[in-house]
Image (cartoon, rainbow, N blue to C red):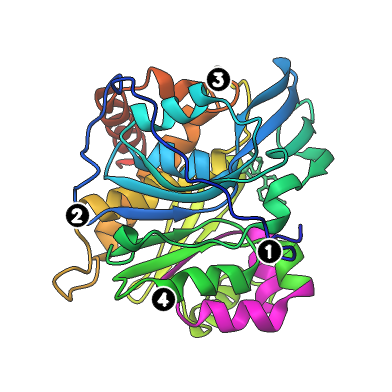
């Protein structure tokens, strides 16, 4: 991916449709929101459960939808002329502020992938950057004073530029991938210095640290900047590292898995959304190990719901009660 290499022509800002949001939980004037930056996309997805040629996707979309169940969210992204009003309406129906989404001439980012029989692996068949190739995120003035920032998987220099546009963020972190680790290493290391948390999978953690042993890999990565580190291990769960030690959180096993696309992003949305809902770091205090572990469980819970339908469709009907029920189920399963 090469986000940010081309300058996109200026385009008028996206407007909310006049329609009343279906079930907005938050007002756009709420302070203390979470700002989310990343891809807004259409995806073509084939899994053993079925196939969809064009369905709403993108890391920013998934992160913001998952986080919207916990905290007010304001997004920054770019879409093309083909992006449907009903998809914007879906986001605003969840109370998400889309004031930072730019509509540029051209087509929306398109990604297509196919999953293996056990859905643990996927192959990317097509990546059309389209307008996303010119993404140069500009935060609306009204976003700059927010305390929480989640940077989706984009070029590290762009992640740094977004961070620099915030006035005094209290909790900053994000995601990255092997492409940036391999080819943009120095830029990434500079970016990570400013982060409080990093969410990364186990193979990426080994690549970034140059260490095979996960515990030693985590210590090296935490020394790069992000004091809170979550290493995701797919269906096997996640390991959380922080200043008081580490905890292993098991994965949630589902009966009905349709489409894992976006599960990692929904994990991120649940994790940071929960921490934002606690107003973590606003009083100068850090989150406790217990709160961080709960945030990881909410991450697993949101990732698991994401997989139950194609694209982000599960979030059209999901309720906070269902989230709490799964959190409690998880607690019962892990108590000895
Ligand atoms: P995940 O399954 O959590 O890795 O996220 C999948 C989402 O990432 C899909 O909805 C894609 O639209 C989006 N995506 C795929 N490739 C890229 C890329 N190179 N840059 C940004 N977003 C991407």
Name the secondary structure under disc 4: loop
Q: Are marks 3 and 1 in contact (CB under 8 Å)?
A: no
Kindly identify the residue that appears in the image at 54 percent across and 18 percent down. Answer: 255
In magenta, the rendered stretch is 183-209
Alpha carbon distance from label 3 to label 1: 32 Å
Mark 2 CB within 8 Å of ligand 1: no
Residue 164: x, y in percent?
Answer: 44, 77
Alpha carbon distance from label 1 to label 2: 29 Å
Q: Residues within 10 Å of mark 4 (few under 14, many from 20)?
A: some
In reply to whether residue 116 is colored magenta, the answer given is no
Does any portion of residue 99 appear in the rendered image?
Answer: yes
Residue on which the image places disc 4: 227
Between disc 3 and disc 2, the foreground one is: 2
Q: Nearer the N terminus, badge 3 or badge 1?
A: 1
Q: Is residue 280 left or right of residue 131?
A: left
Between disc 4 and disc 1, the foreground one is: 1
Q: Is residue 90 left or right of residue 116?
A: left
Residue on which the image places disc 3: 309
| Ligand 1 found in image quarter | top right
Residue 309: x, y in percent?
Answer: 55, 20
Residue 4: mark: 1
Between disc 3 and disc 1, the foreground one is: 1
Alpha carbon distance from label 4 to label 2: 26 Å
In what quadrant of the picture does the C terminus appear? Answer: top left
Q: Nearer the N terminus, badge 3 or badge 4?
A: 4
Name the secondary structure under disc 1: loop
Closest to the observer: 18 or 165?
Answer: 18
Closest to the observer: 257 or 137?
Answer: 137
């Amino acid at each position: 991916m090469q986000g940010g290499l081309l300058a996109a022509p200026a385009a008028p800002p996206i407007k909310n449709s006049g329609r009343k949001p279906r079930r907005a939980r938050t007002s756009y004037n709420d302070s203390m929101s979470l700002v989310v930056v990343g891809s807004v996309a259409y995806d073509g997805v084939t899994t053993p459960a079925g196939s969809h040629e064009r369905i709403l996707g993108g890391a920013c979309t998934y992160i913001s939808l998952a986080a919207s169940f916990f905290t007010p969210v304001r997004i920054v992204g770019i879409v093309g002329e083909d992006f449907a009003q009903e998809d914007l309406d879906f986001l605003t129906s969840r109370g998400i502020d889309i004031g930072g989404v730019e509509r540029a001439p051209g087509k929306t980012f398109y990604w297509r992938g196919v999953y293996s029989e056990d859905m643990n692996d996927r192959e990317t068949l097509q990546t059309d950057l389209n307008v996303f190739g010119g993404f140069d995120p500009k935060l609306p003035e009204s976003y700059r004073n927010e305390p929480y920032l989640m940077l989706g998987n984009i070029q590290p220099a762009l992640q740094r530029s977004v961070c620099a546009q915030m006035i005094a963020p209290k909790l900053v972190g994000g995601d990255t991938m092997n492409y940036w680790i391999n080819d943009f290493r120095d830029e990434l290391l500079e970016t990570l210095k400013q982060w409080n948390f990093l969410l990364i999978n186990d193979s990426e953690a080994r690549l970034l640290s140059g260490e095979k042993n996960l515990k030693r890999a985590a210590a090296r990565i935490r020394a790069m900047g992000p004091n809170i580190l979550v290493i995701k291990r797919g269906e096997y769960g996640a390991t959380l590292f922080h200043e008081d030690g580490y905890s292993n959180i098991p994965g949630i096993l589902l009966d009905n898995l349709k489409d894992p696309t976006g599960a990692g992003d929904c994990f991120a949305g649940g994790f940071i959304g929960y921490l934002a809902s606690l107003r973590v770091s606003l009083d100068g205090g850090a989150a406790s190990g217990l709160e961080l572990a709960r945030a990881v469980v909410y991450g697993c819970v949101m990732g698991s719901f994401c997989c139950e339908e194609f694209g982000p469709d599960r979030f059209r009907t999901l309720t906070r009660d269902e989230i709490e029920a799964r959190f409690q189920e998880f607690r019962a399963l892990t108590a000895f």
